[in-house]
Amino acid sequence: PGDNGGTGRLATKKSKRKGADRGADEYISYARFIESSLSGCEIQDFGGREAPALPAIVNGRLVSVSPEHSLCRKGGGGDKSGAGGSGVASWGVGKRGQLGHGKRDDQSEPTPLMQGIGYGARIVQVSAGGGLVRVAHSLLLTSTGRVLSFGMAHYGQLGHGISKGNQLPDVFRPQYIEALSRVRCQCVSAGELHSAVVTTDGDVYTFGDGFCGQLGLGDKRPQMLPQQVTLGGLEDECVSSVSCGARHTLCVTDDGECYSWGLGYFGVLGRSYTPFKYDADAAIRGMVEDLPDEELAVASAAEFEAATAVSEATEEQVSNHTISEETRAHLDLLGNLTLDDPSNQCYPLLIDSLQEVRIVGASAGHRHSMLLDHRGDLYTFGSGTAGALGHGDLLRQEYPLKVQEFSQNNVKVINMSAGVDISMAVSSTGDVYSWGKTDGGRIGLGAVNTSVTIPRKVGLPGDGKKVNAIDVECGYVHSLIVGLDGSVYQCGGVGIEGAEDGQNDEFDSKDTRAGRPVKLKELNIWHRCAEPKMKTSSAQRWKKYGSYEVKGRSNMMSETEKWGS
């Protein structure tokens, strides 16, 4: 092991020696980090039960990002520390409470969570959810299979249900989902307005907003508490992992099959689907800002027609108590709206075009999706905006298509991540590839504002030495890369406290380092660190004056001067 590097790494007796066994105390911690990163294996305590193996390919194993914030596992101290230890650090925008620090303040640097998880609990997966509509929440998975959530709860995506006051209050510190206390989970995923978990028995539970069928429960109803997904034959399948996108969901089974459900407008489902009975164009709003004019027109056509028809009820028609048949039909439609919908977008269906391919991992992005097979080949589908699919064009793909740049050059992918019109992948040789939007250095390919339509290699700063990567995560204006040594690199950046998004450092735009990955200081995932403690201040002692108790005569007099005698 190297020097502490300001990470707060614990010093042991053996680490202070100058012999060959200097790093003996750190070997187990680093070995767990590598084992967890590559195979998903974690040391779990299920009360005497046999510990199940976590899915090997899953987003959020070490880090996770949303359009507004980031989560990262951070080493804990003592025997409880594992790959990432018991700690979690968060930073970015905190207006929705998604950082878990008990307040709505933004954080510019990774800050450890200090309350809510419990003593000795070890986090084995993190998931940062959110979208472009000022919503964000977070999920944490412990080694005992319990799930914690915090952040915005307005759509039920935290899974805590309705409060006694018949409200959905935001949660500012990690809180265990009691509705999942009877099951043990092995995978969690936070989407934009919904969440999903996979149990050790292979069952899928979803909760949150369901307006686009993203819960897979056969309708568009929101769910305040976790509900098991059983439609589409998923009840008979043993699911290993799940990934939530903006308004769609993907899951992978132990047999190597992939199921999809939710809004299929951009082709993110990778299969054919039947249209919604009632148009959900309003749900597409906010997702099409960068689409070509032709697609924008299609997305808003139905909404425009409905508004035009209603406007045809002129003042003369109203005064004469008459109304056109077309307007009457639209009004009848509005009067009979229901959250029941027979569309197969509302329940899971197999992506049958890949029946001969064994899928081992899935990543659901904002409006595109990625699948990884057991040979290391990568498949993408959905919106091709900014070249996010990596096929050399900007075209939409309705069905999974292999990324030829990897297969033709014999590059085997071991991990991948789909963000908002950006994509990243890690190869078996530790190389990082990215493609899509490059604004603000969000994918580490420089400060130029252009679109990259085929995967390009991303260089990590390493003082002349090659730095191998082990994990990547994509957001909207930033991405994270985890090095083999446990260091974390950030591409781009989220603007906090009113600042602009993009890379925020001392590099000039003409500097070759501008828009490239920047190593985060004082952060290493596997370094064993002391458990963070809350800073508490002693309360002022009460002093007795006469028959009343006040905090001191000086305080009383200052209040008198403030409010007047």
Image (cartoon, rainbow, N blue to C red):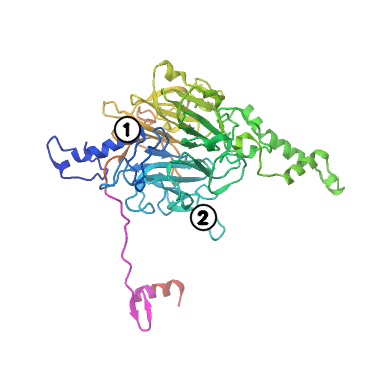
Mark 2 lies on a secondary structure that is loop
Say which quarter of the image contains residue 288: top right
Q: Position of residue 3 (x, y in %)?
A: 21, 38
Label 1 sits on residue: 483
Where residue 490 appears, x then y in whole percent? 37, 35
Q: Quadrant of residue 554?
A: bottom left
Q: Residue at x 66, y 42 (%)?
A: 340
- Residue drawn at (15%, 42%) of the image: 14
> In this orientation, which residue lies closer to the viewer: 36 or 559?
36
| Residue at far top of view | 408
- Tell me the magenta residue range: 530-556
- In this rendering, does residue 110 appear at all? no
Q: Secondary structure at mark 1?
A: strand
- For label 2, count other residues whose C-alpha is less than 10 Å away and answer few (under 14), some (14-19) or many (20+): some
10 vs 295, left or right, is left
Q: Is residue 128 above or below residue 509?
A: below
354 over 343 or under it: above or below: above
Residue type at numbered disc 2: Pro
For residue 161, which numbered disc appears in the image? none
